[in-house]
């Protein structure tokens, strides 16, 4: 940064110096609401006031398993209002309502050329922070967006779309990418295992692609919601055999694709059994580096079933996922089941980790 730009940034920063409230991850199972400095922005950056931030399953994993080193401020499915822009920012101004991705691929490396955006080294660099090591920052009142996010990862909201709805742009993108990696096609029979908020989005999107979608979840409230939102039928895996049920529906063949949205290792062999010969199994929730998976080799080596993975969002689906949410082509609003103010974030995290019958998306809303 040049000397003059630095002085300019310091001047603007002085006007918004001060403290804010933030839910700070302080160690395994411990998020404490405390006062921290409002982030200072530099050239090309934007400071926005968070209005709503969803608690994502990955936040829960990081917090409950202590996967990351404290202190950190998590929360990456967020929307808010721009309060200040750094020198050189042309795309946004104070007062703009925005939704923001927290990482964006470089667009030029080996992986980006092959559209494997999540494997881009630049993508792994988180560009939203409320302080400490950048990790989203949506569990704080203010978030600083770095230049590459401002340029390519922030989207202005239409006036009639609420902040709460807008927070779905990132998870919808992530789920749309997964449904497309599983090559879900019109008329196919698809089983989505798990009807938590992400399983529910996968169901909505497989429906959007024209498939006949069946789901399963042990929680009765989730099965009822799944059918209400568009699943053909939702099975209780503790009461019926999913294999039998899906075979009955497919002349004994099995599902064309099975998407697993529960991080349980034993479900992989079951999903493979439910998939028809040559079918696809997409593991959406199995991202634990320590967990080992067991399945019969012949499922892959003889029956030619494919095991696929999908991680995070895709730049290719960014426009479509934004339009699905912002033009209300997907019913995402109904997926919000609980709202907590920042001061009660610990309760929200607890509920998201141990969902009740009616728990879907749990959101932190900042007044
Ligand atoms: Zn997420
Ligand atoms: Zn790249």
Image (cartoon, rainbow, N blue to C red):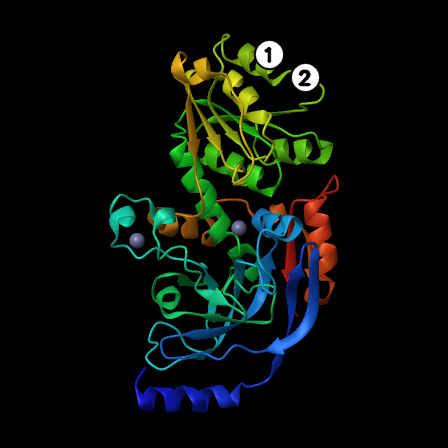
How far apart, in angstroms, are the residues tagged by discs 1 and 2?
A: 8 Å
- Whether residues under marks 1 and 2 lie with C-beta atoms below 8 angstroms apart, the answer is yes
Q: Which quadrant of the figure contains the C terminus? A: bottom right
Would you identify the image quadrant in which residue 181 lies? top left
Farthest residue, direction top: 252
Tag of residue 268: none
Quadrant in the picture for the N terminus = bottom left
Q: Which residue appears at 46% of the width and 61% of the height?
A: 100
Q: How many marks?
A: 2
Callout 2 environment at 10 Å: few (<14), some (14 to 19), or many (20+)? few
* Residue 165 versus residue 44 in the image, above or below: above
| Secondary element type, mark 1 | helix
Residue nearer the viewer, 324 or 106: 106
> Which residue is drawn at the image coordinates 71% and 43% (left, top)?
355
- Where is residue 40? Give x, y as percent: 49, 80
- Of residues 286 and 202, the one drawn nearer to the viewer in this rendering: 286
* Residue that appears at 33% across and 47% down: 316
Residue 347: percent from left, percent from top: 75, 56
Instruction: Please give left or right for residue 110 compared with residue 14 in the image.
Output: left
The residue nearer to you, when weighing 137 against 194, is: 137
Query: Is residue 232 visible to us here?
Result: no
In the rendered image of this protein, does residue 6 appear above or below residue 185?
below
Residue appearing at x 55%, y 38% in the figure: 290
Q: Position of residue 300 (x, y in %)?
A: 42, 18
Which numbered dot is residue 244?
1
Q: Which mark is residue 240?
A: 2
Q: Secondary structure under badge 2?
A: loop
**Placement of 104 over or under 311, stated as above or below:** below
């Amino acid at each position: 940064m040049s000397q003059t730009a630095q002085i300019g940034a310091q001047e603007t920063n002085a006007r918004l110096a001060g403290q804010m409230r933030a839910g700070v991850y302080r160690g395994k199972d411990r998020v404490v609401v405390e006062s921290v400095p409002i982030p200072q922005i530099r050239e090309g950056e934007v400071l926005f006031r968070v209005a709503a931030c969803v608690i994502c399953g990955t936040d829960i994993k990081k917090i409950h398993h202590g996967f990351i080193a404290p202190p950190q401020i998590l929360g990456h499915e967020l929307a808010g209002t721009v309060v200040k822009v750094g020198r050189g920012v042309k795309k946004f101004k104070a007062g703009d309502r925005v939704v923001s991705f927290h990482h964006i691929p470089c667009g030029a490396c080996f992986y980006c050329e092959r559209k494997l955006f999540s494997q881009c080294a630049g993508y792994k660099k988180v560009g939203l922070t409320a302080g400490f090591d950048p990790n989203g920052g949506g569990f704080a009142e203010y978030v600083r967006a770095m230049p590459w996010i401002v340029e390519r990862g922030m989207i202005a909201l239409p006036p009639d779309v609420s902040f709460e709805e807008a927070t779905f742009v990132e998870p919808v993108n992530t789920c749309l990418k997964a449904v497309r990696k599983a090559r879900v096609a019109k008329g196919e029979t698809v089983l989505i295992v798990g009807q938590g908020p992400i399983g529910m989005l996968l169901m909505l999107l497989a429906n959007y692609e024209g498939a006949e979608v069946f789901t399963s979840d042990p929680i009765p409230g989730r099965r009822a919601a799944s059918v209400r939102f568009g699943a053909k039928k939702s099975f209780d895996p503790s009461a019926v055999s999913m294999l039998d049920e899906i075979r009955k529906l497919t002349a004994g063949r099995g599902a064309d694709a099975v998407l697993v949205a529960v991080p349980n290792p034993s479900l992989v062999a079951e999903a493979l059994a439910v998939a028809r010969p040559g079918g696809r199994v997409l593991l959406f929730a199995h991202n634990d580096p320590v967990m080992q998976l067991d399945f019969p080799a012949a499922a892959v080596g003889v029956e030619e079933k494919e095991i696929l993975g999908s991680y995070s969002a895709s730049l290719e689906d960014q426009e479509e996922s934004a339009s699905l949410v912002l033009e209300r082509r997907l019913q995402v609003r109904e997926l919000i089941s609980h709202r907590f103010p920042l001061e009660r974030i610990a309760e929200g995290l607890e509920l998201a980790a141990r969902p009740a019958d009616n728990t879907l998306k749990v959101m932190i809303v900042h007044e």
